Amino acid sequence: MEFKRARTNQQIEERRKEILIACAELFDNGDIDDVHFKAIGEKTSFARSTIYKYYTTKEEILLDLLLIDVMDWACDVREFTEKYEELTKEEYCHEFTQSYVKNERLLRLMSILYSLLEKNCSLEKLTEFKKNLMGFTTPLYESIQKFFPTSNDEAIQTFMFTSSNYILGLYPSTHISDKQKKAMEQSGYEYPIMDFEEMCYKGFLILSSVL
């Protein structure tokens, strides 16, 4: 196949999309170690060297993939917000939990956001990521306003901040590897098996006490 340089904005976006699709496939079927430029290049229609024209590191690709997943999650939040006129606190926490349960790759990427992804990308890329990320918080803010109309801005911001940070730690602690399990067994530590969905709901219910 003859290589053609991407010249128009549409062609550039098509290249980026192709890179993201390849990255998503690799990450979905493995983990971050399985995502690298050689493997991505093998799944695209252009040379591996071309990827460097769009991304400096694999972590920058994963940040863009995370933004796509956050957008899907925000759509799920908006969907249940528009679906119901009223929700009790328990019902709201159930729907909010499901918005995360349905987006497992989002949870996987969020669990390595601070420890791996943000550390190995340029300041310019990280700034762009955080600006875009802030734009996706609006549906959640509006959702809380609708179902908890007496909550003030401070309470809403507190719930949004604490719930997102709760998720960051909850997912990896409920999805430990076989190696981690074996190490705990050999050390004599009996690790309690926790269900992510159940713990997520219970945690949100406690955190929602500020609303």
Image (cartoon, rainbow, N blue to C red):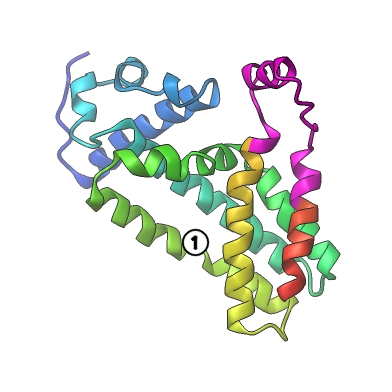
Left/right placement of residue 44 relative to residue 140 reads left
**Magenta residues, start to end:** 173-200
Task: Identify the image quadrant of residue 178.
Answer: top right
Left/right placement of residue 177 relative to residue 56 reads right
The front one of 39 and 210 is 210
Report if residue 193 lies within the magenta region.
yes
Task: Identify the image quadrant of residue 160.
Answer: bottom right
Left/right placement of residue 15 relative to residue 96 reads left
Residue at the (63%, 63%) spot, across then down: 78
Left/right placement of residue 150 relative to residue 20 reads right
The front one of 111 and 92 is 111
Residue 201 percent across, percent down from the top left? 78, 53
Residue 207 percent across, percent down from the top left? 72, 64
Residue 205 percent across, percent down from the top left? 79, 62
Which corner quadrant holds the C terminus? bottom right
Residue 115 percent across, percent down from the top left? 44, 40
Task: Identify the image quadrant of residue 76.
Answer: bottom right
Q: Secondary structure at mark 1?
A: loop
- Name the residue beneath numbered marker 1: 136
Q: Amino acid at mark 1?
A: Phe
Residue at the (81%, 45%) spot, across then down: 198
Residue at the (74%, 18%) spot, across then down: 185
**How many C-alpha atoms fall within 10 Å of the one at disc 1: few (<14), some, or many (≥20)?**
some
Q: Is residue 141 positioned above or below 57 on the image?
A: below
